Image: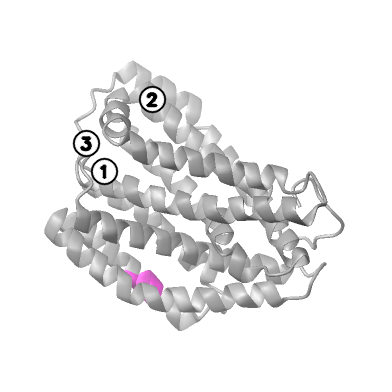
Amino acid sequence: MAVVLLLVLLGGYFVFAGSDIGLGMLLPYAARSPAERRRLIAVIAPYFLGSEVWLVATIGVVAGLVPVWEAAVVTAQWPVFVLLLAAWLGRDAGLWLRGRLPAARWRAVWDGAVAAGSWLLAVAWGFVVAALLGGGTLRPGVTLVCVALVVLLFAVRGAAFGAERLAAAEGVGGAEPGERAARAFRVLVRAGLVVVPVAAGVLWVSAGAAPAVVVAGAEVVLAAAAVDAGRGWARVLSALGMAVLPVVLAVGAELPAPAVERNSLLLLVAAAGPLVPVMVAGQVWLYRISRRPIVGSGFFA
């Protein structure tokens, strides 16, 4: 039950946060003028606030219910989590502060923080996945393919999100950012058709058959996305691609067996269970309102 709850929460984070993190990675390519960058930031925010709730909930469950995992993972790989936290704070600072002053240099600095923080977040999650599959050890081959796979899936998710949202938000600057995101989606999907089989092969040798088979499922998703070419199923297929990551961890992570007290588990499920549908509904609502045209200057942009 504890593993299922963590799988749901972590899956929600990867699926939803993959949208804003991935789009932040594409900021220098998709948005090239001040107006286009403002549009892109306005599409990300405040969507990213809802996405982070899933990660906070995941951390809370791990710390409160299975602290042995917290010790085994965080203590063994604390530099990776320092990188993840620094990237998280830097990206969020960029989103919060870039609109505080109208100066071009000020906004350029924080736009850079958003892009760099998004890339570092994706890379850090690649390291986390590699560490969990390696039993707390970063094996060179596994680490390389995990980082490449995770970064690719984040970028694909962000490109699909941007192609839809930037095309829908036509209040400022035309449709060019959305078209660039759509082109990036098609290129990234084709790259994934090469990266994913390599990752599955390396994981088969180093981490076992189960995670390799799950990763191979991402190849099916990307193949479907390549056929669709962003014509309508991009957001669904990119979400399925991100959902591969928590499943890989569920079947392949080398972690000590948790000793979960039954009463604590029941209390947590009773308290957190009803919140999950509320979190999903809130995230969907944020997803829908981000389709509205952008007019004037908002708090973030």
Separation of marks 3 and 1 at Cα, in angstroms: 7 Å
Q: Which residues are magenta?
A: 219-224
Question: Mark 3 Cα within 10 Å, few/some/many (few <14, many 20+)?
Answer: some
Q: Sequence-wise, which precedes: disc 3 or disc 1?
A: 1
| Residue 292: quadrant of the picture | bottom right
Q: Sequence-wise, which precedes: disc 1 or disc 2?
A: 2
Q: Sequence-wise, which precedes: disc 3 or disc 2?
A: 2
Q: Residue at x 31, y 76 (%)?
A: 194
Residue reaching furthest to the front: 105
Left or right: 274 as drawn, with respect to 297? left
The answer, for residue 288, to whether it is visible in the render is no
- Dot 2 falls on a residue whose secondary structure is helix
The amino acid on which the numbered mark 1 sits, given as a three-letter code, is Leu
Separation of marks 3 and 2 at Cα, in angstroms: 15 Å
The residue pinned by badge 1 equals 132
Q: Coloring scheme of the render? A: one colour
- Dot 1 falls on a residue whose secondary structure is helix
Q: x and y percent of residue 277 in the render? A: 55, 40
Residues 115 and 1: in front is 115
